[in-house]
Image (cartoon, rainbow, N blue to C red):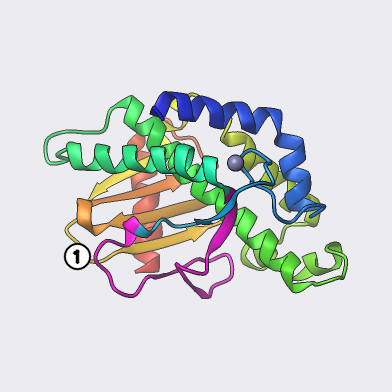
Amino acid sequence: MELKESLLLLRKNSRIYHKKIINSIIYQDKVNVCPFCSSENNLTKEHVIPKWVFGNRSEKYFTTNTNGLEQTYSKATIPACSFCNTQILSTLEHEIVRKMRGVNLVNEYFSDEDHNDIILWLEIIEYKFHVLNMRRKFLKSKNGRFIPYLSEFPLSILQNNPLTPSQIFSVIRKAHRNLAVKSKSNRYNSLVVFRTTNPDFHFFHTTDHFIFLELAEFGVAFFYFFNREFKLLSQAHKEANIIIDKVY
Ligand SMILES: [Zn+2]
């Protein structure tokens, strides 16, 4: 499938099935639903962090600050229907790889169109984390109701100001709605692109705040602020550097 066609479908499904999808994630009326189109058929395992981002690294794990625990790549999966997995998400990922291969960041920069696709890709990862975390909480609760478990929901531990359940739900709704937004132009300055010679994969992520992905194979790292808009890219750059310094 062509990228444009795939993304059009992703946006369309996000709008049409928003309520149905969010209800299935939050209220768990149906556990096994594709979180991109609400289909209950042909469900496959979609990796929250795609395998290719780990490059040659043999141990594929990553840490996410949502729970402060190391998560293995292979266990961090959510359901997605086979169509969304192979025709939409994979198509976008192939495009991201193609863009990274095609640009020489020594003297070039990503185009606006590239920015749009990269931002969408990072927003999809954020959304997948939300789905993963909600599912994990639910699956643990067995036949119990979901709501009582929210007091220990990882998102609320992490934030400086703990989120109430309704705030968590609104963050998830927003993460899903972002997928329906075609132009990310107001967010271009929220994406900082670094050249890197670091030989290893690095990743950190704080839900609803930022994501950092260092892709050794391509000599590129992305830092994206999910919620912030900046007048100047240099401001985002400066703030991203402060956070990176703290983590490393
Ligand atoms: Zn689907």
Residue 128 in sight here: yes
Residue 224: horizontal and vertical position, in percent? 43, 46
Q: Quadrant of the C terminus?
A: bottom left
Q: Does the magenta-highlighted stretch encompass residue 56?
A: yes
**Which residue appears at 78% of the width and 65% of the height?**
150
Q: Would residue 177 be found to the left or right of residue 10 on screen?
A: right
Residue 91 is left or right of residue 100, and the answer is right
What kind of element bears circle 1? Answer: loop
Q: Quadrant of the N terminus?
A: top left
Residue 237 belongs to magenta span:
no
Q: Dot 1 surroundings within 10 Å: few (below 14), some, or many (20 or more)?
A: some
Report the residue at 43% width, 62% height from top.
Answer: 204
Ligand 1: quadrant of the figure = top right
Q: Is residue 193 left or right of residue 229?
A: left
Q: Which residue is mark 1?
A: 199
| Between 33 and 106, the one nearer to me in the picture | 33
Q: Measured from the top left, where is residue 238 in percent x and y?
A: 34, 48
Determine which quarter of the picture holds residue 177.
Answer: top right
Per the rendered image, the range of residues in magenta is 52-80
Q: Amino acid at mark 1?
A: Pro
Where is residue 247? Give x, y as percent: 39, 67
Q: 96 left or right of 100? A: right
Looking at mark 1, is its residue's CB closer than 8 Å to ligand 1? no
Q: Quadrant of residue 197?
A: bottom left
Name which quarter of the figure residue 243 lies in.
bottom left
